[in-house]
Amino acid sequence: MEIDIAIEAGGWAGEEALRALAARAAEAVFAAAGQAAPRDAELSLLFTDDAHIRALNRDWRGKDKATNVLSFPAHDVAPGEAVPPMLGDIALAFETVRAEADLEEKPFDHHLTHLIVHGLLHLLGHDHEDDDEAEKMEALERAALARLAIPDPYR
């Protein structure tokens, strides 16, 4: 899978470190979902700051506040369907991710990996709009993170 990285703002690590982290997260997601990781699919990640993610959240979701991660699927897919060639975009806000990791006393990379896993699951058609969907999505997140030796973020 091709992973495009754009580092726009914030105190993010270097591009290669972020690409490696994202690739491990993606492999774990597909393994947890029982799907082969697509070789020809493309995923874009934007590493930005609270100001830009707040604008994206306001413009695309009508919520005028910063958030940790936003997912923008390129195609509507249902969980388990064939992966489209372009998965979509995931945007992450440095200040919010850092603050959450610090508040929850988690390693920053563990929290970032969790958010990439979460965002990618959205691109693959998973959601958490109701309790049943949330339980299924959280179970996949836990399974993917366990493959990476990252503790359950919902404990």
Image (cartoon, helix red, strand yellow):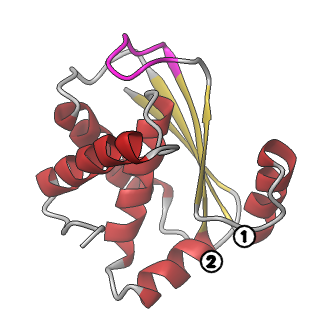
For label 1, the residue is: 50
x, y (%) of residue 11?
59, 76
Q: CA distance from mark 1 to mark 2?
A: 6 Å
x, y (%) of residue 79?
37, 23
Q: Nearer the viewer, residue 64 or 96?
A: 64
- Residue 150 vertical placement versus 74 (above, below): below
Q: Is residue 85 magenta?
A: yes
Label of residue 95 in the image:
2
Type of amino acid under label 2: Glu
Can residue 11 be seen here? The reply is no
Name the residue: 47% across, 44% down. 130
Type of amino acid under label 1: Asp
Residue 4 appears left or right of 18: right
Q: Main secondary structure of the magenta part?
A: loop
x, y (%) of residue 32?
19, 37
Can residue 12 be seen here? The reply is yes
User: Residue 1 appears in which quarter of the rendering?
Assistant: top left
Q: Secondary structure at mark 1?
A: helix
Asked whether the residues under the numbered discs 1 and 2 touch, taking CB atoms below 8 Å apart as contact, a structural biologist would say: yes
Residue 32 appears left or right of 101: left
Q: What are the residue bounds of the magenta stretch?
A: 77-86
Q: Nearer the viewer, residue 111 or 139?
A: 139
The quarter of the picture where the C terminus appears is: bottom left
Name the residue: 37% across, 10% down. 82
Name the residue: 84% across, 63% down. 64
